[in-house]
Image (tube, rainbow, N blue to C red):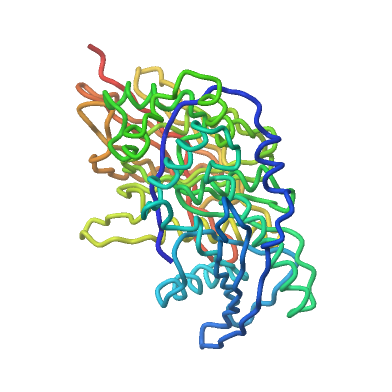
């Protein structure tokens, strides 16, 4: 499973567009079909192989592969986790699928082929999304934005998995924990807003909700839009075209617009050195999210969530363990630990971060990075252990004498024998001039 990332942090006019997305997803499509192709056993467990056609979009059939990984000793039940990604199954994907399901000790499905690509003169990923946005702006056909068929593909995968579960396992599959990375994280948000079967959602490295605020803040932080969103700036999509159709486009696909529907438990996973988004982009939408919510920042990690360790090796365990713990808790209806926190200043003028953890915390630490400006994309994060007083702690960080300093706290928990971490929001402090 490749973590296929890339996307956009943009601006939008806040116009109601629920009906456009919801109607598209619910629209009947006679092209939809699926086929069970058999299973394969190994020492790790069993993998079930399914082929699916999710829809016909703009005259093009979208074909997908689904793989369901069930570790040895695990039985399918009424809920399942599903990870949506691009590409096709291969040996590496199978190893990671089993690894994630083994960590969580639950069945996990991987949906491939999100989106159907390449299309339109070989365009892929963000270039393809931008192309469909431009076509919508030109002719007003509301089926064009690629996030709509991407979302419908995930909804149809849930339909398929329910039918498969009933046919092969004689089990009624009712709910799903949905996850995916970058534009597939974007798809996860929109699927959660569209379908009541999603009981929990874990979007990865898509730290750009509330588009109308994100681009101005990115320019404030970097002096210009991130080079990583050039597919959109080069097509005239950023800044947003000053017309009703342009504003509606972004309202149709911004998960922030659908926040009243996103009341299920949420886990947001970000890389602290992700070049796509501003470091503290989460702060532009966190308070607007309703219901149970958690966040994980992976220090010294970019858009792929590979943490660079002190010896230079890369490790994705921090992200995988927390995703697995979240999926396990909500698939098996176990209690997932929660945290609250408060950033303020102590009496001596330095920064204070008060953390309260509900769920038997095991350890706490603070991560700190420095930068000459608010651009922390190349900064190194360093950790300092804190002390828990039962389930709470106070952490203190000196204010910088020059430049900027960023920090967040991290708490370790355990669920099902798996140790994992959660984070607080970030705070960036500038030296006084």
Q: Nearer the viewer, residue 337 or 255?
A: 255
User: What is the count of numbered marks?
Assistant: 0
Q: Nearer the viewer, residue 178 or 320?
A: 178
Q: Residue 67: x percent and y percent?
A: 56, 73
- Using the rendered view, name the quadrant where residue 53 is placed: bottom right
| In this view, 271 is above or below 59 | above
| In this view, 351 is above or below 338 | above
Q: Is residue 252 left or right of residue 365?
A: right
| In this view, 214 is above or below 311 | above
Q: Is residue 380 left or right of residue 49?
A: left
Q: Nearer the viewer, residue 118 or 10?
A: 118
Q: Quadrant of the N terminus?
A: bottom left
| In this view, 246 is above or below 414 | above
Q: Residue 428: x percent and y percent?
A: 35, 27
- Using the rendered view, name the quadrant where residue 30 is placed: bottom right
Q: Quadrant of the C terminus?
A: top left
Q: Nearer the viewer, residue 36 or 358?
A: 36
Give me the residue at 60% from left, 45% from top.
266
Q: Is residue 429 left or right of residue 160?
A: left
Q: Residue 31: x percent and y percent?
A: 67, 62
Q: Residue 340: x percent and y percent?
A: 56, 36
Give me the residue at 51% from left, 74% from top.
98
Give me the residue at 23% from left, 26% from top.
373
């Amino acid at each position: 499973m490749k973590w296929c990332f890339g996307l956009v942090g943009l601006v939008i006019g806040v116009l109601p567009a629920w009906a456009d997305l919801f109607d598209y997803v619910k629209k009947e499509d006679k092209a939809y079909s699926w086929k069970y192709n058999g299973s394969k056993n190994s020492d790790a467990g069993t993998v079930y192989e399914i082929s699916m056609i999710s829809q016909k979009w703009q005259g093009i059939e979208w074909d997908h592969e689904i793989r369901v990984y069930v570790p040895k000793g695990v039985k399918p039940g009424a809920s399942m986790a599903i990870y949506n990604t691009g590409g096709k199954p291969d040996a590496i994907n199978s190893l990671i699928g089993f690894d994630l399901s083994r960590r969580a000790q639950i069945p996990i499905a991987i949906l491939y082929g999100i989106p159907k690509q390449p299309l339109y003169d070989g365009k892929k990923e963000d270039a393809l999304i931008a192309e469909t946005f431009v076509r919508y702006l030109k002719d007003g056909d509301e089926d064009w934005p690629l996030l709509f068929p991407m979302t419908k593909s995930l909804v149809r995968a849930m339909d398929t998995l329910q039918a498969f579960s009933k046919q092969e396992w004689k089990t009624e599959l009712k709910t799903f924990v949905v996850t995916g990375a970058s534009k597939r994280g974007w798809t996860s948000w929109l699927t959660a807003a569209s379908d009541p079967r999603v009981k929990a959602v874990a979007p990865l490295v898509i730290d750009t909700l509330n588009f109308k605020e994100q681009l101005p803040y990115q320019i404030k932080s970097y002096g210009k839009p991130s080079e990583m969103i050039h597919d959109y700036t080069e097509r005239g999509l950023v800044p947003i075209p000053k017309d009703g159709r342009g504003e509606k486009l972004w309202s149709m696909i911004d998960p922030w617009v659908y926040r009243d529907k996103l009341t299920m438990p949420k886990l947001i996973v970000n890389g602290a050195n992700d070049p796509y988004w501003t470091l503290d982009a989460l702060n532009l939408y966190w308070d607007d999210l309703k219901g149970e919510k958690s966040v994980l920042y992976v220090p010294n990690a970019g858009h792929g969530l590979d943490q660079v360790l002190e010896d230079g090796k890369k490790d994705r365990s921090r992200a995988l363990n927390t995703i697995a713990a979240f999926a396990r808790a909500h698939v098996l209806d176990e209690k997932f630990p929660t945290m609250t926190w408060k950033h303020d200043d102590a009496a001596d003028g330095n920064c204070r971060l008060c953390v309260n953890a509900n769920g038997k915390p095991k350890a706490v630490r603070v991560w700190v990075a420095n930068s000459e400006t608010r651009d922390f994309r190349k900064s190194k994060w360093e950790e300092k252990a804190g002390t828990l007083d039962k389930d709470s702690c106070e952490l203190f960080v000196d204010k910088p004498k020059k430049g900027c300093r960023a920090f967040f706290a991290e708490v370790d928990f355990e669920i099902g024998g798996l140790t994992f971490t959660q984070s607080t929001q970030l705070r960036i402090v500038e030296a006084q001039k």
